Image (tube, grey):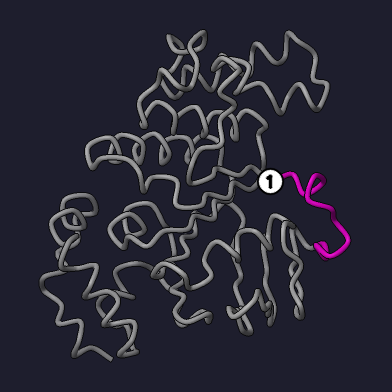
Amino acid sequence: MIKLINVSIRLGEFSLENVNLDIRQGEFFSILGPTGTGKSVILEMIAGFYKPDSGKIFLAGRDAAHIPPEKRNLGFVYQDYALFPHLNVYKNIAFGLYLKRIPSLTIKARVKEVAEMLGIVKLLNRYPTTLSGGEQQRIALARALVLRPPVLLMDEPFSALDPNTRKKVYSDLKRLHAKYKFTAVHVTHDFAEAALLADRIGIILNGTVRKVGVPGSIFSNPGDPEIAAFLNINQESSDADIEGLTGMNFQQHNVCGAG
């Protein structure tokens, strides 16, 4: 579905080098790494906001170099939600459909469908500034999903939410992914979040993708001292969350000694 082949880009002093990823259709794929390692840049290249200096990106078998951003048929959920404060919730969700000149009856039906799925029907006449962080996050998800994109890109979408709200939104997202079967590419620095949501994880450190695999396998056998150190940092704050959310007991693994 999404392939990056030897993709490199330099932005000022920062660079990504020879990124290779093969994200399968319908997969939930998390890009995991510390702040400043290039996770968001990968998303922005997939979306077409940045053009790689070298390498190729393919979307559904097509060379993305020939597809402008507005033609890539992707949904994007931003870290700060990027809601329009002067539009009510209904119009925020429907905004992309208006741009596509979708008939008004179809817009109403689609907005109603996603609003019911996310439990935000009662919010449709309110404005973003009156909503909690969790409510704004649901609006941002609804606005992306109402377009029915085959691919949903999410850039640290839950980092500003409190733990209880995050768990509720995780549940919503897993349910929506199961229903709509879109391909999801999700950026996070939180292993607990990635372990809960993702089918597979790609770990990026210092501008390179270092390992790709299923969450439990990566944690139990990182195969790289830097990966082990990064996961240990996350483990200190997230063991209880990881075990509670995923049913995996990561305390059983001696990460630093693995691989």
Vertical comparison of 101 with 220: above or below: above
- Report the residue that reaches farthest toward the front: 12
What crowding class fits label 1: few (fewer than 14 Cα within 10 Å), some (14-19), or many (20 or more)?
Answer: many
Residue 30 position, x and y percent, is 46, 60
Q: Quadrant of residue 198?
A: bottom left
| Residue in view at x 55 percent, y 42 percent | 77
Q: Is residue 121 magenta?
A: no
Residue 106 position, x and y percent, is 72, 14
Q: Which residues are magenta?
A: 62-73
- What residue is pinned by disc 1? 74
Q: Is residue 71 magenta?
A: yes
Amino acid type, mark 1:
Leu
| Residue in view at x 68 percent, y 77 percent | 9
Left or right: 221, with 106 as reference point: left
Residue 116 position, x and y percent, is 47, 17
Q: Quadrant of residue 53?
A: bottom right
Q: In which quadrant is the N terminus drawn?
A: bottom right
Left or right: 107, with 204 as reference point: right
| Residue in view at x 19 percent, y 68 percent | 235
Looking at this view, is 190 or 198 the one in front?
190
Q: In which quadrant is the C terminus drawn?
A: bottom left
Residue 40 position, x and y percent, is 55, 61
